[in-house]
Image (cartoon, rainbow, N blue to C red):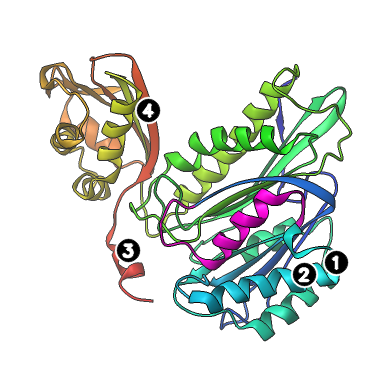
Amino acid sequence: MEAKILKGGGVTSAQGFQAIGIACGIKPRGEKDLALIVSDVPAEVAATFTTNLVKAAPVKLSMKHAKKGKVRGIVVNAGCANACTGVGGIADAKRTVEHAAKEFKTKPQEWLVCSTGRIGTRLPMPLVYKGIDKAIAKLTHEGGEDAAKAIMTSDTRRKEFAMRFKVNGRKVTIGGMAKGAGMIHPNMATMLCFITTDACIDKATLQVCIDEAVEHSFNRISVDGDTSTNDTVIVMANGLSGTNLLKSYHPQFDLFKKTLTHVMRKLARLIVEDGEGISRVVDVVVKGAANAQDAKMAALAVAKSELIKTSWTGGDPNWGRIMCALGYSGARVREEMVEIYYDGLLAVANGQPSKTPIAKLRKLVRRAKFTITIHLHTGTGEYSILTTDLTEEYVRLNKGE
């Protein structure tokens, strides 16, 4: 049985998960800015965190707690990143989980904390304490939508997705929510993602699954080439579906991995489609590279090039800029063997212009979404990445906070 998409699904779609999003005053205009995600029972947890050497206080704390054992919940705030805040910021992150743990009569180590927003400012802890209390009073098994709203910063819409399938005749659900619109680049960026599942799976196996799923989802998106201080992906599995333990030898294990990856890929695409100031979403696919690493280098060079991205903004199929990026990418490239396609229409053959009329290519590049396929004809390596154009609106949005 293949997994099915749940209409309106999110972080509370799986059995035994509650959530809520409330306004506690961190954001100045009274918007929702604090979310709780709580499992009814202790849950296995696996996570990946930013590769930036400058890590926010909540990232440092959550990295420690995620290694220790099962967890009960996550506290998330928006509007303040609690990054570059020194020992005081670490203390604030600790106080946040200690307050939540006290209210639930659990250990602080059973809680994770995430923050997103402005770097360099301390959390207003009196507001955070009151916000946690308010959120606990409103927790509900139908609170996923409010939670998804509360973690938004420059996002223009909430990002939620869920799927369901059967294991041993029982329903298993994987649902999640994410935020992110800028500072998006492979190895994750200003991006938070929270996945919940009622699958029965051990911590080590779950970590293997999340690592693989992140590599094929959040590590294959790019908006502006910046990697942030706060990005986090957390998966909680509480086992309340009542299935047999999912191990590598289980008949439905591959279905679980496939579905987890699908959920993450969908959430990753929602982030790119909501990229700050974008007007184009572009799939860059490299085929026939000497090896997988060469394919990755070639794809990243194209996806990161500001010259290429701005040409997309103007609806200009400037494949010469793509050839240039391939040449400096570090991948093995033989100019006379390169083919480039726009939505399957040949633009470059043997490293030279094809016979396709430029007007047809322009029409394709003016679409809101299109695919550029690059064939290097030097091997069998493949890689793909989802990226965007670079607009004047992006500059306007980011020239000051």
Residue sitting nearer the eye, 343 or 291: 291
Q: Are marks 1 and 2 in contact (CB under 8 Å)?
A: yes
Which residue type does callout 3 highlight? Glu
Q: Which residue matches tag 4?
A: 383
Q: Secondary structure at mark 1?
A: helix
Classify 10 Å Cα crowding around label 3: few (below 14), some (14-19), many (20 and above).
few
Q: Which residue matches tag 2?
A: 100
Q: Quadrant of the N terminus?
A: top right
Q: Quadrant of the C terminus?
A: bottom left
Residue 217 rendering spot, x and y as whole percentages? 50, 38
Q: Secondary structure at mark 2?
A: helix
Sequence-first disc among 3 and 1? 1
Q: CA distance from mark 4 to mark 2?
A: 42 Å
Q: CA distance from mark 2 to mark 3?
A: 40 Å
Residue 398 rendering spot, x and y as whole percentages? 34, 68
Q: Which residue matches tag 3?
A: 393
Residue sitting nearer the eye, 371 or 345: 371
The disc placed on residue 330 is none
**In the rendered structure, does residue 271 fall within the stretch colored magenta?**
no
Which residue type does callout 4 highlight? Tyr
Say which quarter of the image contains residue 287. top left
Instruction: Residue at 72% x, 80% y: name it.
Output: 129
Left or right? Give the position of 24 relative to 377: right
Which residues fall within the magenta stretch? 50-73
Q: CA distance from mark 3 to mark 1?
A: 45 Å
